[in-house]
Amino acid sequence: MAISVPTETLEPGMVLAEPVFNRWGQILLTKGSELSPRHLTVLKTWGIPKAVIESGESEAVDPQIDEEILRNAEARIKKRLLWQPQNALEEEIIQLAIQQVVHRSLPWGP
């Protein structure tokens, strides 16, 4: 399960379930990064309000992200694609693109 956690409550050792983007859409930390004290300082310096981290529980949708926004983002990306993903790497690229569209639709997005 991935959960959204406010930056001020993040702790060293937590693992990111999603990449962290700055307000220009650039990746500050990649998915799977284990947070260090330095990472926490970077997130606070960039004004990142929250991060999605992994937890040991079953997978669930971030309650802060509306299902309709997620569906619209997925439809928008898939409409633009002229190919179907053939492997896990290509599927990950699609998921990152969907996350980017969702990120831009949120209040703190670019």
Image: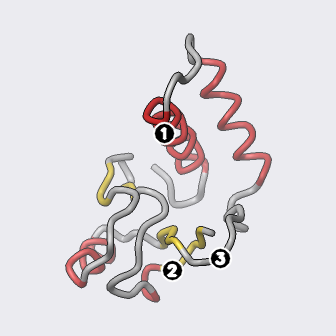
Neighbor class of circle 2 (other Cα within 10 Å; few <14, some 14-19, many 20+) is few
The residue closer to the viewer here, 11 or 89, is 89
Which dot marks residue 57? 3
The residue closer to the viewer here, 8 or 4, is 4
Report which residue position mark 1 lands on: 92
Amino acid at pointer 2: Pro
**Residue at (51% x, 68% y) in the render:** 52
Asked if 93 appears above or below 85 in the picture, the reply is below
x%, y% of residue 57?
65, 76
x%, y% of residue 24?
35, 47
* Contact (Cβ within 8 Å) of mark 1 with mark 3: no
Compute the Cα span from label 3 to label 2: 19 Å
Compute the Cα span from label 1 to label 3: 22 Å
Neighbor class of circle 3 (other Cα within 10 Å; few <14, some 14-19, many 20+) is few
Which dot marks residue 15? none
Q: Nearer the viewer, mark 1 or mark 3?
A: 3
Q: Quadrant of residue 80?
A: top right
Which is nearer the N-term, disc 3 or disc 2? 2
Report which residue position mark 2 lands on: 6
Q: Quadrant of the N terminus?
A: bottom right
x%, y% of residue 67?
78, 52
